[in-house]
Image: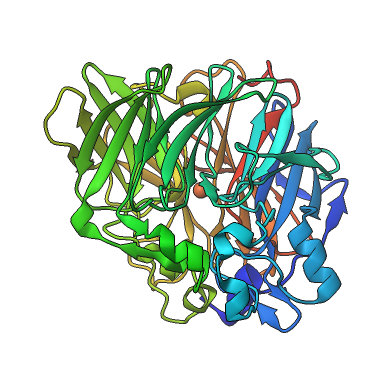
């Protein structure tokens, strides 16, 4: 990875920007009408201090709107207390994932219950009940206007802001939004919530845990909600003292195995507790029921070392070697017996996406899209887009010299003829050009359809969502 790339991708500050018409090469599909909204870090430095981790930076929203073959773009920092205060005071004042403000030991004492929770929601985008949410793992999810990207309000699962962690990947199924909340304390709990279209919150389930796991996502099926308790765990007393940044209180304890907690999605009752081998993952990809078995597809790692690889110091090191996430299928026998695992593809994959609206929870779901590392490359950051066929294990890829693509978002074609009949949208950083572009690929063969070039480089972000102009037209 070149020094220019390191700086462009991770270390600088993006500029807010509006472009009514981006230059397009190729031909945007005429049917592609709607908005891709993406989230991720846009600023890594405040005054003399730099955030330490990829998951720390101040949230920036990017909206790409498609109409009549042209593309407009709006990029704007999410309006948060965390960034406003940092700008006003010239220093980091809120605790982020792996960066704490400079504080005295006294101020750290009992920090879990006294510190202010960041509203820097920089991980993902939720679209639920006609609302748009910028989401992260703290209690505060920020609602914004999809056109202006201005802040509208906040949403929380529980009224208290402190002492809890949510996943950045709620499931939206059957007109409801489900999420898992971990409450830290002397008696920690994992709780499941269901939110209806009027944003009424209902606590579905609650189970005590002695050492809560770091969980970035969970799984859902028509009848179950499944929590994978990776053995990357925290002693809640460590969070009470808060002597280290949040994530540095977690430790890898493989002797715990990986408990898989199965809840009845309708009653909230804990109906099964199974155990898989020790492994770690950020992302559940899909889950479904097959007879008396549950099938969970997860991007799995042998341990949690990937978290430390995302420190900026590691990411920007010339000898970066990222651990490879692998699409792995875990089969859970609900009536007893051991959990089985099978690697579906040896190819490296992260930021996995499926056609969620069309195929989530369905056994016939076949294709997974993501970013990955070119085999035989010299290391460095994710440098290709990949499509894995979970039936055959075969892959297709897209890559180009000095190009670093972000999460691919699938958009189905109207009157589609198959699961992969549509396009993938990915924001690609072209390090040689010093700019980013919005890439449109045919989701079937990963051939380029068109691209729209931005006037600046965008830092490498995380997740996004595509919302059709007419919600009925592209589903
Ligand atoms: Fe994620």
Viewer-side residue, 189 vs 467:
189
Answer with left or right where residue 69 lies relative to residue 404: right
Q: Colour scheme used in the picture?
A: rainbow
Q: Residue at x 62, y 19 (%)?
A: 414
Answer with left or right where residue 15 lies relative to residue 108: right
Answer with left or right where residue 56 lies relative to residue 85: left
Can residue 390 be seen in this snapshot? no
For this orientation, the residue located farthest to the bottom is 48
Viewer-side residue, 270 vs 441:
270
Can residue 176 be seen in this snapshot? yes
Q: Residue at x 81, y 38 (%)?
A: 145
In this view, 118 is above or below 126: below
Q: Quadrant of the C terminus?
A: top right
Viewer-side residue, 220 vs 411:
220
The percent coordinates of residue 56 (x first, y second) are 60, 64
The percent coordinates of residue 368 (x first, y second) are 41, 38
The percent coordinates of residue 412 (x first, y second) are 57, 26
Q: Which of the 4 image quadrants contains residue 91?
A: bottom right
Q: Which of the 4 image quadrants contains residue 319?
A: bottom left
In this view, 109 is above or below 271: below
The percent coordinates of residue 316 (x first, y second) are 52, 77
Q: Residue at x 60, y 77 (%)?
A: 106
Answer with left or right where residue 229 lies relative to residue 112: left
């Amino acid at each position: 990875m070149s020094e220019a790339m390191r700086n462009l991708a991770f270390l600088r500050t993006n500029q807010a920007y509006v472009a009514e018409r981006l230059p397009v090469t190729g031909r945007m599909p005429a049917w592609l009408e709607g908005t891709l909204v993406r989230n991720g870090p846009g600023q890594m430095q405040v005054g003399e201090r730099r955030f330490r981790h990829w998951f720390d930076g101040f949230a920036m929203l990017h909206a790409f709107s498609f109409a009549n073959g042209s593309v407009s773009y709006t990029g704007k920092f999410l309006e948060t207390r965390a960034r406003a205060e940092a700008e006003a005071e010239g220093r980091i004042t809120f605790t982020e994932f792996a960066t704490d403000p400079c504080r005295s030991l006294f101020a750290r004492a009992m920090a879990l219950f006294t510190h202010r929770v960041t509203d820097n929601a920089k991980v993902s985008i939720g679209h639920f009940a006609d609302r748009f949410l910028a989401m992260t793992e703290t209690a505060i999810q920020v609602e914004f206007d999809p056109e202006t990207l201005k802040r509208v309000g906040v949403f929380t699962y529980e009224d208290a802001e402190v002492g809890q962690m949510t996943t950045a990947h709620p499931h939206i199924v059957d007109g409801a939004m489900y999420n898992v909340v971990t409450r830290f304390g002397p008696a920690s709990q994992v709780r499941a919530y269901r939110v209806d279209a009027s944003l009424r919150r209902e606590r579905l389930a609650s189970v005590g845990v002695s050492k809560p796991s770091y969980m970035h996502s969970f799984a859902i099926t028509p009848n179950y909600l499944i929590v994978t308790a990776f053995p990357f765990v925290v002693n809640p007393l460590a969070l009470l003292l808060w002597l280290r940044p949040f994530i540095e209180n977690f430790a890898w304890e493989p002797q715990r195995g990986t408990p898989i907690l199965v809840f009845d999605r309708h009653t909230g009752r804990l109906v099964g507790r199974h155990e898989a081998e020790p492994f770690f993952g950020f992302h559940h990809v899909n889950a479904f029921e097959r007879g008396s078995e549950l099938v969970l597809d997860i991007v799995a790692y042998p341990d949690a070392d990937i978290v430390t690889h995302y420190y900026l110091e590691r990411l920007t090191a010339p000898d970066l070697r990222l651990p490879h996430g692998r699409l792995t299928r875990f089969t859970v026998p609900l009536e007893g017996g051991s959990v089985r695992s099978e690697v579906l593809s040896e190819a490296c994959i992260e930021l996995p996406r499926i056609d969620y609206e069309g195929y989530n929870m369905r056994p016939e779901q076949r294709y997974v899209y993501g970013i990955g590392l070119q085999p035989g490359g010299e290391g460095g950051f994710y440098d290709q887009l990949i499509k894995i066929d979970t039936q055959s294990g075969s892959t297709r890829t897209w890559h180009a010299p000095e190009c670093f693509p972000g999460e691919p978002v699938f958009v189905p074609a109207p009157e589609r003829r198959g699961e992969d009949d549509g396009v993938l949208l990915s924001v690609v950083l072209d390090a040689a050009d010093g700019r980013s572009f919005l890439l449109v690929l045919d989701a079937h063969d990963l051939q380029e359809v068109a691209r729209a070039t931005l006037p600046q480089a965008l830092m490498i972000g995380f997740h996004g969502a595509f919302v059709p102009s007419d919600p009925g037209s592209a589903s």
